[in-house]
Image (cartoon, rainbow, N blue to C red):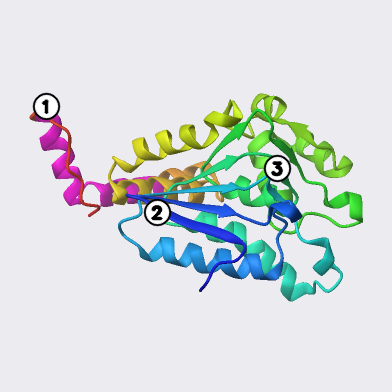
Amino acid sequence: MVYENIIFEKEENIAIITFNRPDAMNALNNRTRDEFREAMAAVEADDQIKVLILTGSGKAFVAGSDIKEFSQTTAYGAHNIQRLGGLVEKLNKPVIAAVNGFSLGGGNEIAMSCDIIIASEKAKFGQTEINIGIIPGGGGTQRLPRLIGVCRAKELIFTGDIIGAEEAYRLGLVNRVVPMDQLIPAAKELAKKIATKSAAALKLAKTAINRGLQTNLESGLNYEYELYSLALTLEDKAEGVNAFLEKRVPNFIGR
């Protein structure tokens, strides 16, 4: 696919997807969704890619759905919107959101689907759907309460208020806040650090965390033990132990 509304880049073992409709605040139209799904499939299939960074161009990360197309959105279209967050959450590699500006509505739902969120000091966050008479449809009513607590999430969803980066950090929505000119360097630095770890172990850890959040503690602990037992059989486990004993940097192969 020839990308028009995103930029898809690779830097060694790190992929960067940039939402690139700056004149429309990177709002999600059908073309952008299709391109994003295509790029995510490419990341999933590329074993050389260890970590994915999502960001936006201009003044926004993603400022929600494209309202120009919204009047034509059907239940089927809404399902497609919801699936974008699922693609991110289920990707078998860590995903870092580098939120540069407005992260609203469906854009915020994509950010919350990421494993880690780094925000620039200019970033703004909100589930603003109530302002046009609807509710979040891409995971906002489910992921936001899990991240910041039920009462605060209800307040943001019921009011449609937009909060700044520092408030988002205080609430636990983002991992850190950095100056705008340090956003991508900070995201890349973290991605490079994560990329040195075992890809197989990272996949198991992400799966254990995400699956565990969907069940009770006892079931989550049992599932964790299953994946831990699997991790003990990995070639990377043997390499990691040997490297530790030999006081050298491990050479993980992702198996």
Which numbered disc covers residue 247?
Answer: 1
Residue in view at x 81 percent, y 38 percent: 156
Q: Quadrant of residue 255?
A: bottom left
Q: Amino acid at mark 1?
A: Lys
User: Where is residue 170 shown, x and y percent of the image?
Assistant: 67, 24
Residue in view at x 54 percent, y 61 percent: 87
User: Where is residue 183 shown, x and y percent of the image?
Assistant: 54, 33
Mark nearest the camera among 3 and 1 is 3
Mark 2–mark 1 Cα distance, whole angstroms, equals: 31 Å
Residue underneath mark 3 = 59
Mark 1 lies on a secondary structure that is loop
Residue in view at x 14 percent, y 44 percent: 238
Q: Is 25 in the magenta?
A: no
Mark 2–mark 3 Cα distance, whole angstroms, equals: 23 Å
Mark 3 lies on a secondary structure that is loop
Frontmost residue, 220 versus 123:
123
Q: Is residue 199 left or right of residue 57?
A: left
